[in-house]
Amino acid sequence: MAHVITRPCCNDGSCVDVCPVNCIHPTPDEPEFMTAEMLYIDPDTCIDCGACIDECPVSAIYPDDQLAKADEPYLQINADYYKDHDVDGGLVKHQKAPQLPDDELRVAIVGAGPAAFYAAEELVKRRQIKVDMYDRLPTPYGLVRAGVAPDHAKTKGVENTFSAVERKPNFTYHLNVEVGTHITPDELRERYGAVLYAVGAPHDRRLGIEGEDLPGSIAATDFVAWYNGHPDYADRDFDLSSEQAVIVGNGNVALDVARILVTDPEKLAGTDIADHALDVLRGSKVREVIVMARRSIEHGAFTNSEFLSLGDLEGVDVVMPDELVLSEEAAAAEADDSLDSVIATKIRLAREFAERPQVDGNKKIIFDFLASPTTIVGDNDGVASVEYVRNRYVGDGRIEPTDETGTLATGLVVRSVGYRGRPVEGLPFDADRAVVPSDESRVLDGTGGDRLPGLFVSGWVKRGPTGGIGRNRKCGQEAARAIVEDFANGVLPAPSRDADDVVELVTERGAQRVDLAGWKAIDTVEKTAGKQAGRRRVKLVSVNELESAAQSAGDGA
Ligand code: NAP
């Protein structure tokens, strides 16, 4: 018997750390780790000890004889990885921890999402390091709360890892406190030996085509934040009165949005989706979602696990083009059986979808490959159609437009072409890559410039908006190690002021700071309401409601 990793895999690699025979790959030390869709267990090496099952934060690992029917394809997906990856079993190597001075080090972390928490997890292991975590929202966990789709409850299991960190005695929350408004970046630097920015990439990338800003042309990043109850988006109004929706881009966010648009709202009603979104989805007229990708299936940016799971949606057909066009390189590699295993799985799954019969009356997710929108047509009343051009491959995965054009009638265009970082006050910014320039997590003074002592970055603001939640574990750990190393080597600037005044300072400036007790009170209010409604939680979606719930901690409620 062997163990098998399935869809919720978050890539955080915690299973790798506990595997005694090194049968889970790619490991965080292997180059492919940062681009891998998920982790895979080698069935020939696994000794079936179960350590990975206990450690997995998202319950993604099962013994092969206990797989649910829908997860059976993962037997092959796990085994296939080892067809073209020659990996060594053996002992996992651990780095020796540097010797630290006895002095106290205070670290400010700006942001409370996965990249912030994975760094904090590493830092709070050292008793002389105290972590203060700041977030402008009254709730922590970043994209785990505001990005992960509500029907992916298992992925939110990483919250257990984060809540173990927030309970440590050397960890303090300053939630509902905005850096730049209630405390300046300079004031942080004066008070902390190290400041780590883990502020993500909050904007959407732009298509740069005519009609992009018409009503009815929306950014997937906004739509996701809206259905997840992010307070900044709770008042947004999305019109779902069109029967056909077009999603541009084919990453995992595109698939999340497609799924949410066609899933029976009564199924979503059992999740923690925001109530306002559920109401709108109940009235939605959308029946067909076209996922428009500028390249073909071999370059699909979605992960195979998310692609596969579309097939489990009740009352929904996944429709593939009549002919699956591949690049010359992929077609040749397929012919001589040398295709990369992950791409081979993408193509195999697409062909399996194509063979499935379509059912009258079902909703549809329709994939259209090698097509790019050229104009979004409409007026102030909304979008009417999308004009597109057909593309062809010209080598090395690059495409060019052909003469073939077309028009799709639609009232809703969702632009899902990725997130984009924004400049962070007080830090240099690489506008081309939309990241803060850094070297081994240390902020650089301009691209390729000198290191700025005491300033660090982690997560999407450091490496760009790629990788799911767990990918930030390695990134956060690297940032934490950089801080610890600089502390050990005495190169962190000595603070000029004590950080004990920050609560008074931010309160004077109008912040209604939420601490751990306040967050726990919010959590209890939401979970209690969820329990009554048979849901995971019922999210509070306005800052006022969240602040009131947080205050109930002080009332002894
Ligand atoms: P993404 O994975 O980078 O996908 C962006 C998509 O937009 C790609 O298909 C890309 O095509 C396309 N695109 C970019 N510019 C375009 C243009 N000008 N015209 C047409 N298409 C364009 O981004 P994402 O979906 O926003 O996801 C962000 C990260 O979060 C990803 O790493 C994703 O895996 C992760 N995430 C994971 C999960 C999960 O694990 N379940 C869920 C959500 C998000 P090209 O490939 O041709 O550039």
Image: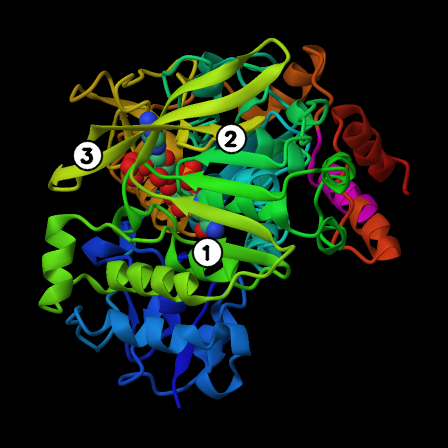
Q: Decide: few, some or many residues near mark 3? Use Cα within 10 Å; few <14, some 14-19, many ≥20.
A: some
Determine the CA span between mark 2 and mark 3: 22 Å
Q: Is residue 232 left or right of residue 219?
A: right
Segment colored magenta: 514-525
> Which quadrant would the C terminus be assigned to in this image?
top right
Mark closest to the chain's N terminus, 3 or 1:
1
Q: Is residue 361 left or right of residue 460?
A: right
Residue in the picture at 27% in, 84% down: 45
- Magenta-colored stretch includes residue 519: yes
Mark closest to the chain's N terminus, 2 or 3:
3
Query: Looking at this view, is 92 or 346 the one in front?
Result: 346
Q: Main secondary structure of the magenta part?
A: helix
Query: Looking at this view, is 11 or 265 the one in front?
Result: 265
Is ligand 1 closer than 8 angstroms to the Cβ of mark 3?
Answer: yes
Above or below 495: residue 333: below
Above or below 143: residue 344: below
Q: Which mark is residue 399?
A: 3
Residue type at mark 2? Answer: Val
Is ligand 1 closer than 8 angstroms to the Cβ of mark 1?
Answer: yes
Residue type at mark 1? Answer: Glu
Q: Is disc 1 placed on a helix, strand or loop?
A: helix
Q: Which mark is residue 306?
A: 1
Residue 23 point in image, percent of width and height: 29, 76
Query: Looking at this view, is 363 or 34 the one in front?
Result: 363
Q: Which mark is residue 414?
A: 2
Residue type at mark 3? Answer: Ile
Q: Decide: few, some or many residues near mark 1? Use Cα within 10 Å; few <14, some 14-19, many ≥20.
A: some
- Magenta-colored stretch includes residue 24: no
Determine the CA span between mark 1 and mark 2: 18 Å
Camera-nearest label, 1 or 2: 2
Q: Is disc 2 placed on a helix, strand or loop?
A: strand
